[in-house]
Amino acid sequence: MSEQATNAPVVSASDGHAPEQEHHDPPYYKILGVLTALTAVELFWPVWFPQAPIMLILGLSVMAGAKALLVAMYYMHLKFESKVLWFVMAFPVILAIIMVAGFLPDAVGYHDVLRPQLP
Amino acid sequence: MESAAALPANQNPAKQNPLRFTFGKLAMWLFLASDAMGFMGLIGGYMVLRIGSDNWMIDALDPAFGIPLTAFMTFVLILSSVTMVTAHSAAVKGDQKGIVRWLGLTIVGGVIFLGLQVYEWNHFIHAAGDLAAVFQKTNDAKAPFTHYQATFFALTGFHGIHVTIGVIYLSCIWRRAKQGAYTAANHSPVELVGLYWHFVDLVWIVLFTILYLFPDPVKG
């Protein structure tokens, strides 16, 4: 039996489905453990890589992304949802990437006008 | 033969949605998608300011963040996501006492988070005020409101409004749950408030990293 079939939460009648006989929740408390562990690692990451800003930012970004993905997949049940809802959420993600990419030239060309005024 | 209209919703083919979700759920996801774009606009602006700044945090003006406190706030919000998903699980099983108990704990988590945010803001405002007073005295000029402070208040404030709305929304659902409004066959509102609450948690996970943990470009 596939993981989805065994771990998928019951899709209730309010979702337009007949409830399944067996109810298997995803491992919510294990995911809590992973999220807590990742948060702890994030806190110590700057201590481990104090002189490597790229490693620091990359590591923190990957961990934040992993945590966000875990919440979306398991707590928001996106892993078990229809692909239509995946597309609904894919749009803002794609648009966000385009927008941030569009902002980057501004960021490179931007200079903090406040800083030179300070003594 | 039993007519289709007489059948319960979960056995009635006419009420079953071939898309596998209710329109309420689709509406909530569409709302969350648009809300995510709002957050991305703020985060994108923050990134432009921060990447373009030679020295993001100005020691003479900007107080440092209390990372242990905000890490604890993150843990509280993650924990409230677990209580929320447990409330939904209880709703699926038709456990009405479970729905009330776990929704109540989720509300408590949200209120603790908001209380800590108020404490953090209060501390930050006073610390920034003290620094500004010293700056004004030593330089004989009014202390400027820095991008560091502006983006901190804009991002955490926008998120805090979402948490506040989430607590109010949860309280409304909790009240209805106490009245026994939700059963195994009818608990869509519990699921929808859960989606909203998890989204608020997800956004904070991102904000915590980029706002509090990312290093200063110059200081490293």
Image: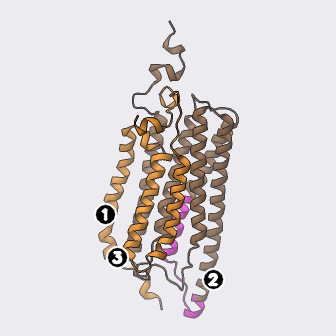
Q: Count residues near mark 2 (Cα–Cα under 10 Å), then give few for <14, some for 14-19, many for 20+.
A: some
Residue A38 in percent (x, y) is at 49, 61
Residue B59 in percent (x, y) is at 52, 84
What residue would you read off at disc 3? A110
Residue B61 in percent (x, y) is at 54, 83
The answer to whether dots 3 and 2 both sit on one chain is no
Residue closer to the observer: B199 or A27: A27
Tell which subunit mark 3 falls on.
Answer: A
The stretch drawn in magenta includes residue A80 = no
Tell which subunit mark 1 falls on.
Answer: A
Who's brown, chain-wise?
B
Q: Residue at x 43, y 35 (%)?
A: A5
The answer to whether dots 2 and 1 both sit on one chain is no
What residue would you read off at disc 1? A101
Q: Is residue B176 above or below residue B117?
A: above
Tag nearer the camera, 2 or 1: 1
Q: Which mark is residue B130?
A: 2
Q: Determine the image quadrant of residue B137.
A: bottom right
Mark 2 → mark 1, Cα distance in angstroms: 38 Å
Residue B83 visible in the current orientation:
yes
Q: Is residue B150 above or below residue B144?
A: above
- Earlier sequence position, callout 1 versus callout 3: 1
Residue A81 in percent (x, y) is at 42, 39
Q: Which residues are magenta?
A: B135-159
Tell which subunit mark 2 falls on.
Answer: B
Q: Secondary structure at mark 3?
A: loop
The amino acid sitting under disc 3 is Tyr
